[in-house]
Amino acid sequence: MTLVKICGVKDAAGFDATVAARADMVGFVFYPASPRAVTPAEAAALSGRAAGGPERVGLFVDPEDALLEAVLAALPLDLVQLHGEETPARAAEIRARFGRPVMKALGVAEPTDLARLADYAPAVDRFLLDAKPMPGAALPGGNATAFDWRLVAGAAIPRPWLLAGGLTPDNVAEALRQSGAPGVDVSSGVEQARGVKDPARIAKFVAAARG
């Protein structure tokens, strides 16, 4: 079954819808510049709304140890997602120091971008393959844009991975068909306004990804 991660959840309606749709992962953003950012206390309160359910993922951008410590003290994350310029050495350091699996996000725009996977593979447990941000973009990540999904079709990706970037309930099935991805990650594609999740779109996305 296709793994589904709903990222950037910041309110009760979005969290409850993610749980109800039986998504595999729910992502909390600990990056203040993001419109989806939450504090450790806010994320812990949301997570406490349901026992069990999706794995809790924390998204960080070049985090200091102090931030990781504060989040993990408030919320027992299942997975740390690194979405900045973290090196393989830093990813390995975080995994060892904090005892959590690490997922590294890497931008893809052309086939040569996949060469970086080999450098990170020994240091991480998963990859998130996202669209590269446009030059001058204020935020990391795909920023609701998609890359050519055919670039990863049949590629030898050395860790389990998720496809991200520009996914919506309407295109996720085609994205899976073209890419062969074992899982998908969505944020803006299931929102009714910037940073505000739409419960109906969350349900529709999960159903389409697993259809």
Image: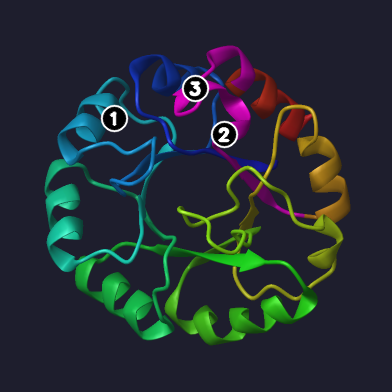
Pick the front one: 148 or 122: 148
Magenta range? 181-201
Residue at 17% x, 57% y is: 67
Classify 112 as above or below 23.
below
Give the image location of residue 91, x and y in percent.
37, 75
Would residue 204 be counted in the magenta stretch?
Answer: no
Quarter occupied by the C terminus: top right
Give the image location of residue 103, x and y in percent.
46, 62
Classify 122 as above or below 178.
below
Residue at 73% x, 34% y is: 209
Give the image location of residue 12, x and y in percent.
34, 17
Q: Which amino acid does label 3 sit on?
A: Lys
Q: Mark 3 sits on what residue?
A: 197
Q: Mark 1 sits on what residue?
A: 47
Q: Mark 2 sits on what residue?
A: 188
Question: Which corner quadrant of the image does residue 97 belong to?
Answer: bottom left
Would residue 192 be counted in the magenta stretch?
Answer: yes
